[in-house]
Amino acid sequence: MPNPTWPSTLPAPLADTTAAFDAVDNAVRSNTEAGVNKVRRRFTAVATPFTCTVKLTQTQYATLMAFYTTTLLDVLPFDWLDFRTGAVATYRFIKRPAGSYVAGSIDRWLVTLPLELLP
């Protein structure tokens, strides 16, 4: 069964410093009594944390929350773009999206998306 896709009515992340892929350390280092330390991979595949912000209207915010709670059931993966390459990628929410109303605006929300890019 294919993954759900990011709703087409929702915008791409803001192109600012809030969009970031975090570095993930996948190495385990072991000290030895003599010589060079041993190093090995911890896992064969690693999810990469990705945080971004989107600017939404109230209707778009409702669409996002319906997608999160109803379509993804809070935990399922979904397909969207890898913004570094433009290729389709699979993501999963790390936690519920957090939105804040933009003061002085009409019908605008800034919503932070805590995601992880799946291998």
Image (spheres, rainbow, N blue to C red):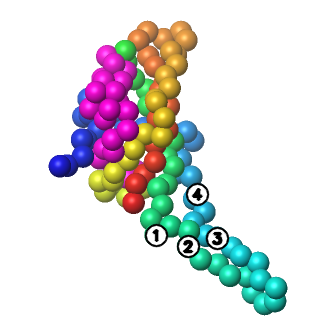
Residue found 25% across the figure and 41% down from its top: 5
| Residue with the mark numbered 1 | 44
* Label 1 vs 4, first from the N-terminus: 4
Mark nearer the viewer, 2 or 4: 2
| Residue with the mark numbered 4 | 23
Per the image, label 1 sits on a secondary structure element best described as loop
* Label 1 vs 3, first from the N-terminus: 3
Rounded to the nearest whole Å, what is the CA distance between mark 2 and mark 1? 7 Å
Q: Is residue 102 above or below residue 88?
A: above
Residue found 52% across the figure and 19% down from its top: 100
Rounded to the nearest whole Å, what is the CA distance between mark 3 and mark 4? 15 Å
Judge the density around disc 1: few (<14), some (14-19), many (≥20) Cα neighbours within 10 Å. Answer: few
Tell me the quarter of the image containing the C terminus: bottom left
Judge the density around disc 3: few (<14), some (14-19), many (≥20) Cα neighbours within 10 Å. Answer: few
Residue 109 at x, y percent in the picture: 46, 19
Query: As shown in the figure, which amino acid type bears the numbered disc 1?
Result: Thr
Judge the density around disc 4: few (<14), some (14-19), many (≥20) Cα neighbours within 10 Å. Answer: few
Residue 89 at x, y percent in the picture: 33, 53
| Residue with the mark numbered 3 | 28
**Left/right of residue 4 with respect to residue 44 in the rendered view:** left
Circles 2, 3 touching at the beta carbon (< 8 Å): yes
Is residue 63 shown in magenta? yes
Per the image, label 3 sits on a secondary structure element best described as strand
| Residue with the mark numbered 2 | 41
* Label 2 vs 4, first from the N-terminus: 4
Circles 2, 1 touching at the beta carbon (< 8 Å): yes
